[in-house]
Amino acid sequence: MDVFAEYMVKRKKEAKDYAIIAAIVIAGIILTVACFFVIMFLVLSKINIAGVAFVVIAAVWYGAYLLIHMRNLEYEYILTNSDLDVDKIVARRGRRHVEDVDLKEILICACTEDNAFAHEYKNTEGLSKIIDVTGDKANGGVYFIDYNADGGRRRLLFQPSKKMRDGMKKANSRCVHIFGEEV
């Protein structure tokens, strides 16, 4: 029986995101003030290209708008039989592939809140990469998958739906542990 499930999570903005947005706005203000000084200098020098400076100001704020919207991230998880694909969607415009995981080849998949697998979750020794594609960890339901890829061990942190967790369990019942079920 074929298994197909997809689920999308919106990443919650963190303090780092708000700091980046503030820096973009401050840079926009500084560039705008600098352009006004250039306009004033050019007007006093009787050089009349003030229209170009206003176009530059408009371009600065349009660029700031685009950069701020790039902080809006969503992650889409797609489970097809035993393949889990993860994509990152930036500002609902661009899609970038993040990771592929073959569930038949994983070492373990469990909930980060499950005390039975707390030791495995806390053990980060030997991990070459940790890929965090969670939306809001405060909501709970964060799962981790440890697997081998590109000559090293990796960990994927994500928040699958119930349908996706059930499909993952069907793909590899030995290594996928659903929180709340008996081990």
Image (tube, grey):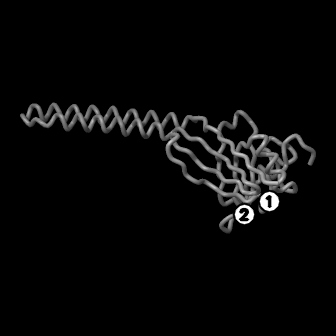
Residue 33's place in the image compared with 177, above or below, is above
**Are the residues flagged by discs 1 and 2 in contact, CB closer than 8 Å?**
yes
Against 40, residue 112 (above or below) is below
Front residue (pair 41, 90): 90
Task: Mark 1: give few (<14), some (14-19) or many (20+) Cα within 10 Å.
Answer: some
Mark found first going from the N terminus, 1 or 2: 1
Location of residue 22 (image quadrant): top left
Q: Amino acid at mark 2?
A: Asn
Instruction: Give me the residue at 43% from left, 40% from top.
Output: 67
Viewer-side residue, 119 vs 63 = 63
> Residue 73: horizontal and vertical position, in percent?
56, 41
* Element class at badge 1: loop
Q: Which mark is residue 127?
A: none
Residue at the extreme bottom of the image, as rendered? 151
Q: Which residue is mark 1?
A: 107
> In this rendering, would 65 be left or right of 160?
left
Q: Position of residue 97 (x, y in %)?
A: 58, 54
Residue sitting at x 22%, y 31%? 36
Q: Residue 148 got which mark?
A: 2
Amino acid type shown at disc 1 = Leu
Q: Position of residue 5 (x, y in %)?
A: 73, 46
Total marks in image? 2
Q: Residues within 10 Å of mark 2 (few under 14, many from 20)?
A: some
List the single residue furthest toward the left: 46
The image quarter in which residue 1 lies? bottom right
- Tell me the residue at 31%/38% (across/down): 59
Specify whether 59 is left or right of 143.
Answer: left
Above or below, 83 against 178 in this view is: below
